[in-house]
Image: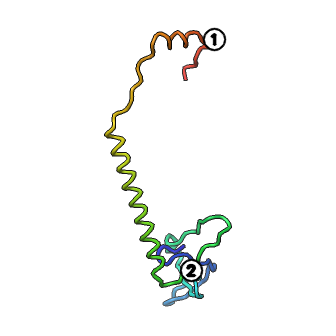
């Protein structure tokens, strides 16, 4: 998965020469046979696809707006979840908790009647 272009198929490492300099690049093949070479110095921009087991990934078309729409939808959902969590924790912080009353004499007698001593932990 390329962060800017979406899901592609790993095509292996290739050696390229450009401007008299030789470098290694990772070949990603997209829908329609389009290829993208990612310099190994920019390897942080790609990651392994992690999806559901047994379901092959949908390969993106290079240059289409579909991947950008998917990314913006995901960002929007993450922001919605963050807003909900912030509201939930603010509500929890404002509510007062419940404190149980101290043990009464009946509770203490029941505990004292146990055959074994509690361990400190």
Q: Residue at x 45, y 81 (%)?
A: 65
**Camera-side residue: 75 or 8?**
75
Quadrant including the N terminus: bottom right
Quadrant including the C terminus: top right
First in sequence: mark 1 vs mark 2: 2
**Most distant residue in the front direction:** 106
Q: CA distance from mark 1 to mark 2?
A: 72 Å
Q: Residue at x 61, y 73 (%)?
A: 57
For residue 7, what is the image quadrant? bottom right
How packed mark 2 is, by other alpha carbons closer than 10 Å (few <14, some 14-19, many 20 or more), is some
Rendered view: 52 above or below 99 = below
Q: Is residue 96 left or right of residue 25?
A: left
Residue 48 picture location, percent across and down: 58, 68
Q: Residue at x 54, y 20 (%)?
A: 120
Rendered view: 91 above or below 48 = above
Residue 32 picture location, percent across and down: 58, 88
Q: Which residue is mark 2?
A: 25
Q: Residue at x 52, y 78 (%)?
A: 39
Residue 62 picture location, percent across and down: 51, 84
**Most distant residue in the right direction:** 54
Q: Is residue 112 left or right of residue 73?
A: right
Q: Which residue is mark 1?
A: 115
Mark seen at residue 14: none
Which mark's residue is nearer the viewer, 1 or 2? 1
Q: Secondary structure at mark 2?
A: strand
Q: Secondary structure at mark 1?
A: loop
């Amino acid at each position: 998965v390329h962060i800017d272009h979406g899901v592609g198929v790993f095509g292996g490492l290739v050696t390229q020469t450009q401007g008299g300099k030789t470098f290694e690049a990772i070949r990603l093949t997209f829908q329609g046979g389009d290829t993208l070479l990612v310099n190994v110095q920019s390897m942080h921009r790609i990651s392994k696809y992690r999806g559901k087991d047994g379901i092959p990934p949908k390969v993106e078309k290079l240059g289409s707006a579909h991947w950008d729409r998917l990314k913006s939808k995901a960002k929007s959902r993450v922001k919605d979840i963050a807003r909900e969590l912030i509201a939930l924790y603010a509500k929890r912080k404002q509510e007062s908790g419940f404190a149980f009353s101290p043990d009464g004499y009946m509770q203490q007698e029941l505990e004292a009647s146990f055959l074994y001593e509690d361990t400190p932990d």
